[in-house]
């Protein structure tokens, strides 16, 4: 699968196999904690529209809406133990999203880096690729299966393993800014930026290890506003007006 290098807006998808990085907080909706099933249904509807274009979809979902290993709720817990709890939270979110997708008539498989056979298949790279080729949505849960690694790192790793054309990172803002746009109203939004600039400016896009993985393997990253209907399809069409494209 050879990704195109033409990122101008197209009427047909620029990318044929994508990995969507979805934060756990994206599933909270207006709640302060937990899962809003209406939001999960809305995400599923968006993914259905992408699936109908013939695009192969993988998803990495976070667990911050339930538990985060480095959060205050972890207290003085051992970091490894806290991170494993966070991995279990991602499995919960993955099963919720799977249910929403299958209610939208999209065949879905959850693959976990932790062995939980009652809920998910074990992650096996060739099996994941085969599911994608059969046009099933594959949700990767439990991060990398290792503590001290974020779901950002898991997203970069899984995207490379399945040979995705791009990582789409859904956020609550419309791209990458020179500073936090909430705190700095004069912050500048980038239509396009390089991975090296992201690292040098220490922009809080993904953690440094994930950005380095993408840079070293020439895997483009699109950061966009997930809360606006239709933006995933626009991102697939190379429309940088809805977000920021990060490349080498």
Image (spheres, rainbow, N blue to C red):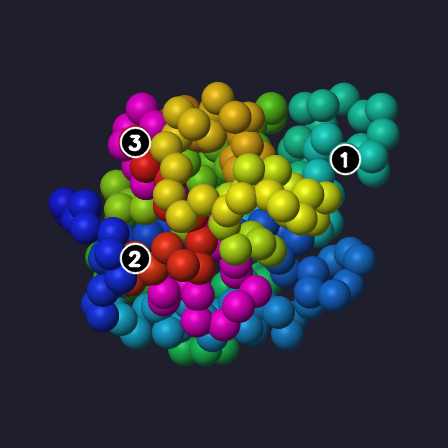
| Residue 146, placed above or below residue 125 | above
Find the distance from the CA under tag 2 to the CA under tag 1: 35 Å
Label 1 residue SS: loop
* Circle 2 residue: 238
Label 1 Cα neighbours within 10 Å, binned few <14 / some 14-19 / many ≥20: few
Q: Distance between the residues labelled 3 and 1?
A: 32 Å
- Counting labels gives 3
In magenta segment, residue 173: no
Residue 237 visible at all: yes
Residue under label 1, please give it.
71
Q: In this view, does 38 lie to the left or right of 149?
A: right
Residue 27, image quadrant: bottom right
Q: Name the residue under label 3.
A: 248
Q: In this view, does 175 lie to the left or right of 163?
A: right
The tag earlier along the polypeptide, 3 or 1, is 1
Q: Which of marks 2 and 1 is nearer the N terminus?
A: 1
Residue 53 to residue 184: above or below: below
Q: Residue at x 55, y 26 (%)?
A: 202
Question: Does the residue at mark 2 contact the one at mark 1 (Cβ under 8 Å)?
Answer: no
**Residue 94 x, y percent position in the rendering:** 55, 55
Please state which of the two labelled residues, at mark 3 or mark 1, is closer to the viewer.
3
- Single out the residue that lies furthest toward the bottom: 104
Q: Whole-percent x and y of residue 103?
A: 49, 77
| Residue range (magenta) | 215-235
Does dot 2 land on a helix, a strand or a loop?
loop
How packed is label 2: few (under 14 Cα within 10 Å), some, or many (20 or more)? Answer: many
């Amino acid at each position: 699968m050879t990704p195109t290098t033409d990122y101008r807006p197209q009427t047909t998808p620029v990318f044929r196999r994508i990995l969507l990085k979805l934060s756990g907080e994206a599933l909270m909706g207006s709640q302060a904690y937990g899962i809003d099933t209406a939001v999960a249904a809305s995400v599923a509807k968006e993914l259905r529209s992408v699936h109908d274009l013939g695009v192969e979809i993988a998803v990495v979902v976070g667990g911050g809406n339930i538990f985060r290993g480095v959060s205050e709720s972890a207290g003085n817990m051992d970091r490894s133990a806290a991170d494993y709890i966070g991995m279990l939270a991602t499995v919960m979110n993955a099963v919720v999203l799977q249910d929403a997708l299958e209610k939208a008539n999209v065949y879905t498989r959850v693959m976990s880096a932790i062995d939980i056979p009652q809920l998910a298949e074990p992650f096996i790279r060739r099996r994941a690729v085969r599911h994608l080729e059969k046009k099933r949505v594959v949700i990767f849960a439990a991060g990398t299966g290792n503590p001290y690694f974020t779901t950002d790192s898991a997203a970069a790793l899984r995207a490379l393993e399945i040979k995705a054309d791009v990582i789409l990172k859904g956020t609550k803002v419309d791209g990458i800014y020179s500073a936090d746009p909430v705190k700095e109203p004069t912050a500048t939004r980038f239509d396009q930026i390089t991975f090296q600039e992201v690292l040098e400016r220490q922009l809080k896009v993904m953690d440094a290890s994930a950005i380095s993985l993408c840079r070293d393997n020439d895997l483009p990253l699109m950061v966009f506003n997930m809360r606006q209907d239709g933006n995933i399809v626009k991102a697939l069409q190379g429309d940088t007006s809805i977000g920021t494209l990060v490349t080498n």
